[in-house]
Image (cartoon, rainbow, N blue to C red):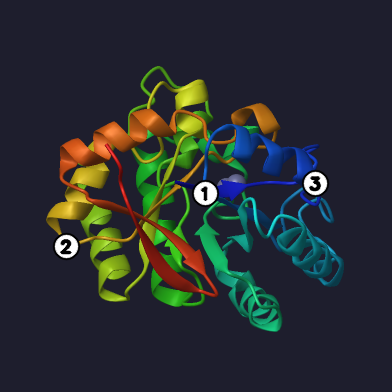
Amino acid sequence: MFDSHTHSNFSGDSEMCAEAACEAAIMQGLKGIAFTDHLDYDFPEFDEAFLIDFDKYSKFMDDLISKYKNKLTVLKGIEVGIQPHVIEDTAKTVEKYDFDFVIASVHIIDRLDPYRGAFYEGKTREQAFIRYLEEILYCVSAYENYDVVGHIGYIRRYGNLDDRTLTHSEFSDVIDSILKKVIHDGKGIEINTSGYRSLGTPIPDYDIVKRYKELGGEIITIGSDAHASEHIGYNFDLVKANLLELGFKYTTHFERRKPVFDKIEK
Ligand SMILES: [Zn+2]
Ligand SMILES: [Zn+2]
């Protein structure tokens, strides 16, 4: 399996050394790892924290790829934080480098960071989740240069909520619209296992993954969203078992922006 979502210390919020991550991936018996460091233009209150010197990043990753050539497939990816007004600048940066893999994520909605709570002010849980999902729908409609949508349901990690579930049955219209658009455009979704670390379920949860399959979705990447090497490959065995149960036979990783399908071994 491949861990298709990790952050090295190029990302402002990670201290993880990329070599340590590669060693952890080898220890976990993974076939490969994609580094997907952050590009979030106009991240409120952080200014430069989520902007990277991509010339340096690209060169560093090329060297790492050669260094691990016979031991582990290392992939040069990026996680772009999409907001409507940064789409053009984001696309320009993505086009400029030879990334293997691009995750498009919504971290900021209406210029508010759910992590900081202001986004939830004056909204019920349902209103907050709907607004977040509508923003994902807008972004997958307006932004094309990506391979998978990151962590659908990310905002349930934050806010002062008693109920942190984000189920397909509760938000079926907007979730179906997102999934249909993704499938129609030949893109995919990810299962982000960071949810297991704080919520007990992955992001998105399996009911949404099940719906994705029902609608014809096949491209699915698995990522730990590790910011520390002990989280590389986190709970991947559990994801594997659940995907087999849902009828998936393959997971996906991306090389040079093309999906490569990996048979799920029992
Ligand atoms: Zn993210
Ligand atoms: Zn991430």
Quadrant assignment, res 66? bottom right
Look at the image and tell me whether residue 255 can be seen.
Answer: yes
What's the CA distance linking mark 3 and mark 2?
Answer: 37 Å
- Give the residue type at disc 2: Gly
- Give the residue type at disc 1: Lys
Closer to the camera, 64 or 56? Answer: 64
For disc 2, the neighbor class at 10 Å (few under 14, some 14 to 19, many from 20) is few
For disc 3, the neighbor class at 10 Å (few under 14, some 14 to 19, many from 20) is some
Whether label 3 touches label 2, CB < 8 Å: no
Instruction: From the top left corner, tell me how far across and down residue 131 is, in percent.
Output: 40, 50
Whether label 3 touches label 1, CB < 8 Å: no
Residue at (32, 76) in percent of width and height? 185
- Give the residue type at disc 3: Gly
Report the residue marked by disc 3. Answer: 12
* In the rendered image, the vertical position of residue 54 relative to residue 135, given as above or below: below
Q: Secondary structure at mark 1?
A: loop
* Beta carbon of the mark 2 residue lies under 8 A of ligand 1: no
User: Is 230 situated left or right of 48 in this image?
Assistant: left
Dot label at residue 31: 1
For disc 1, the neighbor class at 10 Å (few under 14, some 14 to 19, many from 20) is some
Disc number lying in front (3 or 1): 1
* In the rendered image, the vertical position of residue 133 relative to residue 128, given as above or below: below
Dot label at residue 216: 2
Compare marks 3 and 1 and give the one earlier in the sequence: 3
The C terminus lies in quadrant? top left
Compare marks 2 and 1 and give the one earlier in the sequence: 1
Instruction: From the top left corner, tell me how far across and down residue 121 is, in percent.
Output: 54, 34
Residue at (26, 34) in percent of width and height? 242
